[in-house]
Amino acid sequence: MTEQAAYTIALAGNPNCGKTTLFNRLTKSGQKVGNWPGVTIEKKVGFYTTRSQNAADAAAGGKVTVRVVDLPGIYSLTPYSEEEIIARNYIVDESPDLIINIIDGTNLERNLYLTFQLKKLGRPMIAALNMMDEVEQNNTEIDFDKMSALLGIPVIPISALEGKSFSAKVAKLAGHHMSKVAEGGIDRLISKADEILSCGRPSAPSFNDGSGALESRRESHESQESHESQEFHESPESQKSQESQESRRETCLIETGVQNDGEGVEKTKFDPALLKKAETIDYDAQSAVIYERIEKIISATVREGERSVQRERTRKIDSVLTNKWLGFPIFLVMMLAVFQISFGAVGLFFSGLIDAGFNELLAGYIENWFTAAGTSGWMTDLVVNGIIAGVGSVLVFIPQLVILFTFLTLLEDTGYMARAAFLMDRVFYKLGLSGKSFIPMLLGFGCTVPAIMTARAVDNEADRKATIFITPFMSCGARLPIYILFIGTFFAAHQGLIMLSLYVLGILVAVVSAWLLKKTVFKGPRSPFIMELPPYRFPDLYTYLHHVWEKTRGFIIRAGTIIFVMSIVIWFVQGYDFSLAPASDTSQSILGVFGTAIAPLFSPLGFGDWRAAVTLMTGFITKEAMVSTISILFTEAEFEALFTLPAAYAFTVFTLLYLPCVAAFSVIRRELGSWKLAFAAAGYQTAVAYVAAFLVYRAGMFLSFYL
Amino acid sequence: MTKTLSEVKPGRTCKVVNIGGTNLLKNRLLCMGVTPGTTIEVVKAAPLGDPIELKIRRYNLAIRKSEASDIFIEDIRDSSGAADGVAEGVSES
């Protein structure tokens, strides 16, 4: 489908302007979610078919496929953020046939700033004024024709909450004010887009005409190349015919309302490396001038209504949610509730269902079926104890993740997450991070996997990586069973205290690591904290469910690929010896031999036994697996005899801090975007665990000797 | 004597004169509409005193106090529009 798209439209707009909702409305089918090359910023591409008015297309059956690319939500096109560089370079490199600039109609001033910057890139553009339902609620009136004339691009009022969409029906039933002027707006937007696309593409690659003050900063080879190609390929005649074609296209565009404002197109591309020296670039001196022009346009076209329903509502909600005294308690209660529901009884109930269905019912069924069919024993073992058990141990997380994402996405899409960052920033500022690191760290107590995934919200690259490095130190729910086993056996008298000490130790290590990492590896200019607090809004239902699904889907795909392969590998090394024959005893298996080999490494920590080493290795599959490994490898008496008290505590400390499970590791790898960094993270965590366990063991020995 | 935005108390408005600080900070603030001559209302501070919430160009923006201290301002008024000195005179009487 990708190759067949005749035209490409890029959607651009500020964060919180309803861009994703419009994207979903335009492209109900054929959406593809991926990442922009080299970064973890999401790239969404979708398609829709339309009837073309272009003669050439009409000959081909009249229907054309249009590709829609959702650019990251941005406020401007400076070289100061990855998102902005991506959006800018996409438009310059790929020259989309049309840009649809979505504008929050309730916040025209700041939204139009991006419009001005986009216009400079010289692509045909439509402005879609969104949120018209809210604009009308406030009795604000906008002269769209005049605004269109002043901006030099068609302006079309829309409301994502209109038409036959499910969300619109729900909104209507709920008595939501529906915009009159925006009725049919999305259809009008599409037909306007068709009109512009029908003008056709520019006949030749567009040349960089020398322009503006930034000429010197342009990547010079680029303009040279295009000049060269001009000199080489163009004969005067073909140039002439091209010119007339070009002028026909210009006329066509002007008829549709797209004008080039004659200020010169400025197609500067930005090298992502600029980010590293952002401090030294003074890019946009024009801001004040642009804002002055915006103010003039607004005063000529907008009659501000006497009401401001949304802002009043937001102010009232915030008077509670970011209240000096209530802000924190409400935040903590909310987080606790989300936590409790996701990882507590409700989540566990559904996880139990999956466990029963997948790991017992399905595994049992397949085992019987295989046996009946006379499949060889090793094959049955591989499928049942390797693949199903391995993938199943990860699938049981899915209900917890779905519930968690359902709540978190709600908090995100309504606008609360920005408030959470506002509340917490002070605390994390001290650590060298920002308030946005709080959510991943908190979620780390539940499960490292979604925690690492939510670290995407941290916008500064160095901060985000540091957050990913330290999040696994927050003791996840899966580590609890092993603590319970050890504490129950060795520290029965002080269960609560020892348990608490582990959680606190995790937090302390995370905090110290954050500080250390920010001082060394992830050093970088402290990025300023400049964050919009968007008005509270009800999320669009479809968009909301889509967000939840996308996050869950990412996890399921990993469970199906990386974890699938890892399960097979681990099953093999656990059950087979080096001659590739089934091992008679775990100690003879590859894992057992390896465990025996590395066991001496753990002697300084007090548990230099091969079984302890193997237990730690199976902890890489899932932390829960450690308990079952211990129960297989040890008798109760052996277990109690092997660990002294300091060694037992050192072992739990090591378990708390060392490398995370396979699922977490694969997410870390994906989110860091490099194997090298992922191994660095795992190595760092294991090194920290080793040092901490060593210190704990030695201190424990010292105390038990003298006390 | 030039005042900075970090000295403006919640509930007051002021006008931007100039922005200092690093290029990164200056440009990002300019893009967000914090341009000379713009009116800013300081809405509130976060519970721990930092960051602060601003109202500017009909939307709400949160920045840290350290960033606010790079924004030079003048003409502090209370939200009703009375100049600062007058407002204080009233409260003293």
Image (spheres, coloured by chain):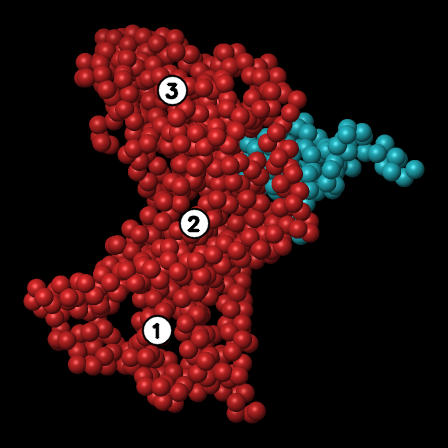
Chain colours: A red, B cyan
Label 1, label 3: how many angstroms apart (C-alpha)? 58 Å
Above or below B77: residue A349: below
Left or right: where A387 falls relative to A663: left
Left or right: where A502 falls relative to A69: right
Q: In the rendered image, which residue does mark 3 sit on?
A: A187
Label 2, label 1: how many angstroms apart (C-alpha)? 27 Å
Identify the subunit bearing mark 3.
A
The secondary structure type at the circle numbered 3 is helix
The secondary structure type at the circle numbered 2 is helix
Judge if badges 2 and 3 mark residues of a common chain: yes
Please say if the residues under marks 1 and 3 sit with CB atoms less than 8 Å apart: no
**Residue neighbourhood size for the residue with mark 2, other residues' Cα within 10 Å, grouped as few (<14), some (14–19), many (≥20):** many
Earlier along the polypeptide chain: callout 2 or callout 1? 2
Q: Amino acid at mark 1?
A: Met
Q: Amino acid at mark 3?
A: Asp
Please say if the residues under marks 2 and 3 sit with CB atoms less than 8 Å apart: no
Earlier along the polypeptide chain: callout 1 or callout 3? 3
Q: In the rendered image, which residue does mark 1 sit on?
A: A626
Expressed as whole percent of the image width and height from the top left, the position of residue A602 reads 37, 80
Q: Nearer the viewer, residue A638 or A654?
A: A638
* Image quadrant where residue B40 sits: top right
Q: In the rendered image, which residue does mark 2 sit on?
A: A405
Above or below A556: residue A623: below
Residue drawn at (54%, 72%) of the image = A500
* Image quadrant where residue A479 sits: bottom left
Expressed as whole percent of the image width and height from the top left, the position of residue A319 reads 66, 42
Earlier along the polypeptide chain: callout 2 or callout 3? 3
Q: Amino acid at mark 2?
A: Phe
* Image quadrant where residue B29 sits: top right
User: Furthest residue to the bottom?
Assistant: A706
Identify the subunit bearing mark 1.
A
Above or below A278: residue A632: below
